[in-house]
Image: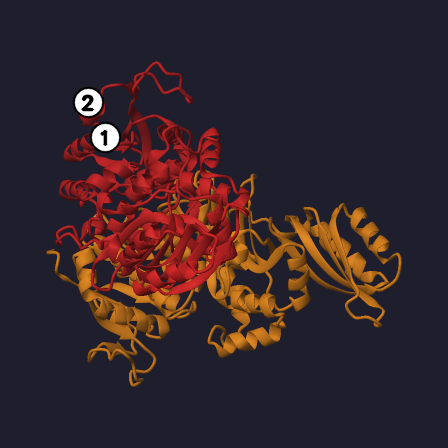
Chain colours: A orange, B red
């Protein structure tokens, strides 16, 4: 084919991101031709409602409500899916690959649930399946794990990959805003959805961690085995005490390769030392720290969501397919599934985690309380690092006790904390937050 | 070919990085096979002295002092060059590409001086020329500009890409160490060479900026047209005054696409606001900030040099070639040279830069001095933002004057500063440092 022959694209989903991609395909046509030698044409776009007003106005005949117009059109060589959700998007992608079409997707849920199967299918069909936008938004982390960092034995990923929670935590830290208020603020600004569950409970981050962890460790990390905790239990005083101790509180998505070959994967709030770059990631920004045996610690920081940033990732995938689309040999083997034939790796249960902890308790304001608590912790093999006692509510007869521990086993800490909660002098166990060093 | 057929590699240079790559090729052979489906064999390594003791010990017959043993060996499919310097490495690479061999190079000088020509040659020969290690060490910025961020219209690159100078500046800022002392410290730790000119005068950074800028803006940015200033004029008091004003001092390599299509490219010390992530890049770490029309601001942070980090980049390139080496269609067109046929872009002379400035002067400690200086600046269309006057050397009759300006034209500032230097009350103009917002 000559370098100017047209490549037809079918879009599935024309919402915020889909609209951005459609605009970039038409608005940047010259730049695309210069960078790839190819001309792209948006042939069909699957939407729910063809009558809805759109900007830019799609050419006549492009909009359709029938997925078959894309899946059954042999002229369409690249399917770009931005519908979100597993159903029906997942089965559409399977059909597109089966029909020999290249696929670009921004769908973290599909890639988390069906990534290895879809990658195998793409491989056997000799087509590309690219998914840069499925984790980290505009941050080019997916491609880095698949390509530039491929030579590394990846040791760990620690990341802030949900902008909604990071915005809420930043507000809570800066203005001592309670969670519920910060959430409403995030909703007012369009950073949180009316049902914020997926974001604030860590489900969105778990999907993304599943995608990144599978690429990093060359084995499936199903999202449902990732230990996931949300941020709704955090109180303004946790941020105050953490700051006193030299930490910020961030919701981290963490995957670590243990020396025995098992992997721990978890999403939860964590104390991060103030001088670590992850502690300085503010607002809706995202960051991913990757540690490899050769590259050492690399941090990528940028916009994890939003129309333009996600369009950058989707369009990058499209351009990279355009650069090789005439290549009859098909795309290179996808390193992301090199280990998919391996037995599913041992995922380390959270009980077996070794971590330092921050504990906040409300206790009776009387002598001997700390001694009783310290005895239980000591009996449980938990060494105390620091204690802060605060008479926060004078006259109430209670005090806040903030304890940090040296690295201990999670199950020991949970058992000891249950025993502490039974003490007569303990009014409530308010929080347990893991500390990342 | 079957997936386990051997690919022969020839290394040129077996120093620090070359030794790391040789060790990775042998030590990680199983992982390479798993990730690429290919077996690699180090067939020849070009060295100066075959008798020198090396760890690991190369297999018999591998070492050679004759480059023809690599360039003329049809069995060698990939040449990996880690000799450094333009001559003879540049002509070796040209010959390797002409012979149809894939090339991986860590050589910033060759890529800066001959990058576009070598890329065209690789293109016409249908082979890869990859150079991730030539800028940013272990930070995967080269690949990001060529691939993941390709859809973006890149607006600017601002980077800390010389670890030696960043180490020295970090020491000067933290301990008020004079430049000469901090340099000796860097040399003692192996971070600076015995002749530190290339690093401290910004030449190394200019080569790397040339590589990154050419990729980002799709036009050659020859290193010799990059305005380059070193760090040796910085004094401990500059760091003190900068800190008072809320800034760190970093040596930045900057390339900016101007709205008129011209590019400004420069390497010099700059004041960076304390709350910007670039201000927090410490010691030998590097960071690159890329701003694109879609991705917004992305920052990549990591190790910019050193054996392991550079090996990560070189091995990543090798693995990516291994993944496609059977592909008869050849590599995709290199977007880095898409604009090489364009007329050479206008490089904006430093005189036409618009920037805010930090100025430090030593003046007579008497009334009316500031008025004289302010008049000259005002006549030159330069608005003063802040003034700090310090009687740093009581009894000397002189005072230090630190002035920051609002954005002004560089040529206006240089002209005004020359006039200020002529004033009888001005003992010396100690420093001019640009301020990056």
- Check disc 2 and report its element: helix, strand or loop: helix
Mark 1 surroundings within 10 Å by alpha-carbon count, few (fewer than 14), some (14 through 19), many (20 or more): many
Mark 2 surroundings within 10 Å by alpha-carbon count, few (fewer than 14), some (14 through 19), many (20 or more): few
Looking at the image, which is closer to me, B244 or A99?
B244
Looking at the image, which is closer to me, A98 or A107?
A107
- Position of residue B288 in the picture relative to residue A424 (left or right): left
- Check disc 1 and report its element: helix, strand or loop: helix
Image quarter of the N terminus of chain A:
bottom left
| Residue positioned most to the left | A2
Image coordinates for residue A152, horizontal then vertical, percent: 42, 40
Q: Disc 1: which chain?
A: B
How many numbered markers are drawn? 2
Q: Disc 2: which chain?
A: B
Q: Which mark is residue A69?
A: none
Image coordinates for residue A119, horizontal then vertical, percent: 36, 54
Residue at 27% over, 19% down: B64
Whether residue B373 is visible to the viewer of this picture, yes or no, is yes
Q: Which residue is mark 1?
A: B89
Image coordinates for residue B398, horizontal then vertical, percent: 48, 49
Quarter-wise, where is residue B223 in the image? top left
Q: Which residue is mark 2?
A: B68
Tell if the residue under mark 2 belongs to the same chain as the one under mark 1: yes
Q: Nearer the viewer, mark 2 or mark 1?
A: 1
- Position of residue A289 in the picture relative to residue A384 (left or right): left
Whether residue A98 is visible to the viewer of this picture, yes or no, is no
Of label 2 and label 1, which has the lower sequence position? 2
Cα gap from disc 2 to disc 1, whole angstroms: 13 Å
Looking at the image, which is closer to me, A115 or B377?
B377
Residue at 32% over, 39% down: B204
| Residue positioned most to the top | B51
- Position of residue B150 in the picture relative to residue A116 (left or right): left
């Amino acid at each position: 084919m000559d370098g100017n022959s047209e490549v037809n694209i079918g879009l599935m989903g024309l919402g915020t991101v889909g609209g951005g991609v459609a605009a970039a395909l038409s608005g940047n046509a010259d730049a695309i031709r210069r960078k790839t030698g190819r001309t792209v044409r948006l042939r069909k776009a699957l939407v729910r409602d063809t009558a809805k007003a759109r900007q830019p106005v799609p050419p006549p005949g492009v909009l359709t409500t029938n997925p078959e117009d894309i899946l059954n059109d042999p002229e369409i060589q690249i399917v770009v899916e931005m519908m979100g959700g597993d159903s029906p998007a997942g089965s559409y992608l399977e059909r597109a690959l089966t029909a020999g079409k290249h696929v670009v997707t921004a769908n973290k849920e599909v890639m988390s649930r069906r990534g290895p199967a879809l990658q195998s299918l793409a491989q056997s069909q000799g087509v590309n399946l690219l998914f840069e936008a499925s984790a980290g938004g505009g941050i080019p982390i997916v491609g880095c794990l698949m390509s530039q960092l491929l030579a590394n034995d990846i040791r760990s990923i620690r990341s802030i990959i949900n902008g909604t929670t990071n915005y809420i935590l930043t507000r809570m830290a800066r203005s001592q805003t309670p969670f519920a208020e910060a959430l409403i603020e995030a909703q007012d600004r369009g950073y949180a959805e009316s049902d914020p569950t997926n974001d604030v409970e860590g489900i969105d981050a778990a999907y993304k961690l599943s995608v990144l962890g599978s690429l990093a460790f060359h084995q499936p990390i199903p999202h449902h085995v990732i230990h996931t905790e949300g941020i709704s239990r955090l109180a303004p005083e946790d941020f105050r005490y953490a700051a006193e101790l030299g930490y910020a509180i961030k919701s981290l998505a963490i995957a670590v390769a243990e020396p025995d070959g098992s992997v721990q994967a978890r999403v939860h709030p964590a104390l991060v030392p103030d001088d670590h770059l992850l502690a300085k990631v503010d607002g809706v920004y995202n960051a991913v720290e990757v540690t490899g045996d050769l590259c050492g610690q690399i941090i990528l920081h940028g916009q994890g969501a939003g129309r333009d940033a996600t369009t950058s990732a989707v369009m990058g995938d499209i351009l990279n397919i355009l650069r090789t689309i005439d290549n009859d040999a098909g795309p290179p083997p996808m390193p992301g599934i090199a280990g998919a034939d391996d037995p599913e790796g041992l995922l380390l249960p959270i009980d077996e985690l070794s971590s330092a902890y921050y504990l906040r308790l409300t206790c009776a304001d009387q002598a001997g309380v700390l001694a009783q608590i310290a005895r239980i912790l000591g009996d449980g093999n938990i060494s105390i690092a620091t204690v802060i006692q605060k008479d926060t509510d004078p006259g109430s007869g209670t005090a806040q006790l903030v304890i940090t521990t040296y690295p201990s086993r999670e199950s020991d800490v949970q058992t000891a904390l249950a025993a502490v909660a039974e003490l007569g002098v303990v009014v409530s166990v308010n929080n347990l937050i893991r500390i990342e060093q």
